Each structure stands twice: as C-alpha cells, then as structure tokens.
Image (cartoon, rainbow, N blue to C red):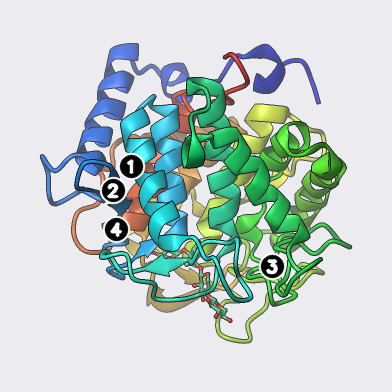
Amino acid sequence: MTETAAYYSGNYRNVFKELGFSNEEIQDRIDDTWNKLFTDENKETQIYYPVGNDKAYMLDTGNLDVRTEGMSYGMMMAVQMDEKDVFNRLWNWTYQYMFMTEGENAGYFAWSCNPDGTKRSYGPAPDGEEYFALALFFASHRWGDGQGIFNYGKQARDLLRTCLHKGENEIGHPMWNLENKLIKFVPNVEFSDPSYHLPHFYELFSLWAYPEDQDFWKEAAAASRAYIKKSCHSKTGLAPEYAYYDGTPNNENGYGHFFSDSYRVACNIALDYEWFKDEQCPVDVAYRIQQFFADKDPEDYRRYTIDGEPFEEKALHPVGLIATNAFASLATDGPNAEKLVKLFWETPVRTGERRYYDNCLYFFSLLALSGNFKIWKANS
Ligand SMILES: O[C@@H]1[C@@H](O)[C@H](O[C@@H]2CO[C@@H](O[C@@H]3CO[C@@H](O[C@@H]4CO[C@@H](O)[C@H](O)[C@H]4O)[C@H](O)[C@H]3O)[C@H](O)[C@H]2O)OC[C@H]1O
C-alpha cells in the first residue's frame, strides 16, 4: 500500500478531467444520468421505482424482477450521491421483502423478488450481501446511525457476521469458504464467480466488521487479489462467469466464458487499485482486457471464450461492457485507456428492456472515472 492510495490521501483520480473535459461537463453528465435512472422524467431509461412514501426498488428490466444485486447497487449509488431518501427507501424495501427469517438461508436476502415484493427464490447471491454491507457502512459514516433497520453500522456488522458464521449454530452455510477465504457463487456450493471478488471492500471490512472477524477480511482481500489474477486468462485478461477455486472456468452449465457477470472484474481491479494501491492488485489484467477490446467494434461485441475466441452470440449488455472497459482506465494509462474512456463518454445510457444491468455499470463507471466513487470513513 502506498500513501498515494485514495484511502490514505483522500485524493481521487478524475480521468475525465485528465482527458480535457471540464468540471461542469462532468458534473452535468453525472446529474443528467442520475435523473435518467432515478426519476420518472424519462421512462425509457428509468430503473428506480418509488413505492408509497417510504420504499422503492430497482427493477431488472430484462428479467422483470428485483435483485439483491440491483438493490445493493442502488444503495451504493445513493450514498455516493448523498441521496439519503433514495437509500432509505431501497433498504426499507430490501429488508421488508427480501430478508429471510427461516430455513437454510435465514439471515440472508432472497436474491430475486417480484416487484410486488413476493419472493421468486429463497436463495441468496453473495454479491448482494457484500454490496449491502459496504453501502450500509458508508451510510453510517456519512449520515450517522438511526434506529432499527436504519442503524446502518449495526446492520452492516451483523450481516457480515452472518456471512462468515452462518451454519455454526444452526443450519446453513457461510458465503465465504473459511479455509481458502474465497467468496462462493452461492452458500451451498464450492466454486466462485470471479466478478464477486471485491478485495477493496474486504480491506474496509477488516477495519469496520466485528473485531473477531477483522483478520478474516484482511486475509480475504489478499486471497481475492490472487484469485482474480488466477481466474483471468494470462493473455486476454478475460474472466469466466463462474470458476473453480483453482481459477479454471466452471462450464458445467455454460457459465465458463466471458459474458455479462465477467465484465465487472475490470471495475473491481480498478477501484481496488484506486482505493488501496496494493502491490498485489492485478493491474496487468486491466491492461490486458483493454488491449483485447481496444480495436473491437462495440456493435460486434460477443460472448468470448476466455482465450478470446468469439461465439456467434452477441453481448447481451454492450453498453455495460463499454462502461466497464472504460472503468479499467482508473488503473491504467496510455492510448487504449484514453480511447476506451472517450468511447464511453460518447455512449448514451441504454434504453429498452435490457437497460438495467448496462445502466448500473454505466453509472458506476461515471462515478469512478470522475473521482466520485469514494470511501466514506467515520466523520468524513
Ligand atoms: O437455489 C439456488 C438459487 O437460488 C441460486 O440462484 C443464483 C443466485 O445468484 C444469481 O446471480 C445473480 C444474477 O446474475 C448476476 O447478474 C446478472 C448479470 O446478467 C444480467 O443480464 C442480469 O440482469 C444481472 O442481474 C448477479 O450478479 C447475481 O447476483 C444466479 O443467477 C442464480 O442462479 O442458484 C443455485 C441454486 O441452488
């Protein structure tokens, strides 16, 4: 770790500004995008839907469901934007409809619900829980703790405790493998999803979780950095959607290739580098991914094997892929980094039924590349 890391310096790179865009242009783009996603002024791009006076959900417009992924992403976006009402509405909906109180997954959140709040599944997806936890810590630090479910700090610590200790005194399984410290795809299986690995989150959990869990999170950060490197192809940098613990693709159900989930790996490397600059952060992977995509036509983005062979099938979320390839530039420099950020800047948010996932990645990339995806510490 170096003193130049944002965690220590409090300074965040503004890649758009480095490329010559003005502060005003950048802020306008952020505000305009927020309005497109979070207000109903533009129904073509909206993914946030208020319900009554105190709840709201993020709609996966392609699958017509509400996912812990989207709810936790929405909460992270809201805390970064200082939108407390949006944050509280999303968390209130999440807690009311997604939290499970019985069965093997009690203490976790159902990963998919209908917009009316009924559950579609009684299983969790760990990428939701880890995003909920950090969004809650940031809310606690930015706005202070309230009562009940709005005691954000306690909610985050309790949730992380469940993630590691589930199954010790009751049925169920932890979300991390306690031996190798790797996050699982879902609690009852023993393989992973490379895009779930967030070493920069675990660094912060190692400071803010209950004391008895802090060492685990520190070790998990190191394990995840090594795992990202192992699971990404040595030449293309591409990660499969699902992978075994040794990093090789898990293609048992067709998820062993570079497709939608995989895009987020580039973002996770880049934000980890920005926040912590750990020497084990696999920045070389971010360079390889950018090299792979630099000369490809976005109209022709496909599903790829991780060694770079294209399938016939087109990418389902090309705007999301443009956004994540640009996000990688937070950790890289040079012509590819510049070209991919400019491509992203020129790309509008997505409209139509598949817009949810693309536009989530789009907004995260805007925040990150403008220096607005920040660590909120206590009293900051
Ligand atoms: O019984 C269990 C099932 O409950 C278990 O369900 C899995 C739970 O995690 C799901 O993963 C989420 C959905 O996909 C990813 O993002 C999507 C990327 O593609 C986009 O098109 C889409 O809009 C995005 O949501 C999320 O990051 C994950 O949280 C997984 O799909 C379920 O199968 O599976 C095992 C059973 O035993």
**Quarter of the N terminus within the rendering:** top right
Identify the residue at image location x=77%, y=39%.
210
Is disc 1 placed on a helix, strand or loop? helix
- 211 left or right of 252? right
**Comes first in the chain, label 2 or label 1:** 2
Viewer-side label of 3, 2 = 2
Viewer-side label of 1, 3 = 1
Structural crowding at the residue carrying mark 1, measured as other residues with C-alpha within 10 Å and reported as few (<14), some (14–19) or many (≥20): many
Q: Is residue 103 visible?
A: yes
User: Is residue 333 placed above or below 380 in the rendered structure?
Assistant: below
Disc 4 + disc 3, Cβ < 8 Å? no
* Residue 202 image point, x, y percent: 72, 42
**For mark 1, what is the residue?**
89
Disc 2 + disc 1, Cβ < 8 Å? yes
**For mark 4, what is the residue?**
59
Identify the residue at image location x=65%, y=28%.
275
Identify the residue at image location x=36%, y=61%.
317
Q: Nearer the viewer, residue 373 or 51?
A: 51
Viewer-side label of 4, 1 = 1
User: Is residue 238 placed above or below 322 in the rendered structure?
Assistant: below
Structural crowding at the residue carrying mark 4, measured as other residues with C-alpha within 10 Å and reported as few (<14), some (14–19) or many (≥20): many
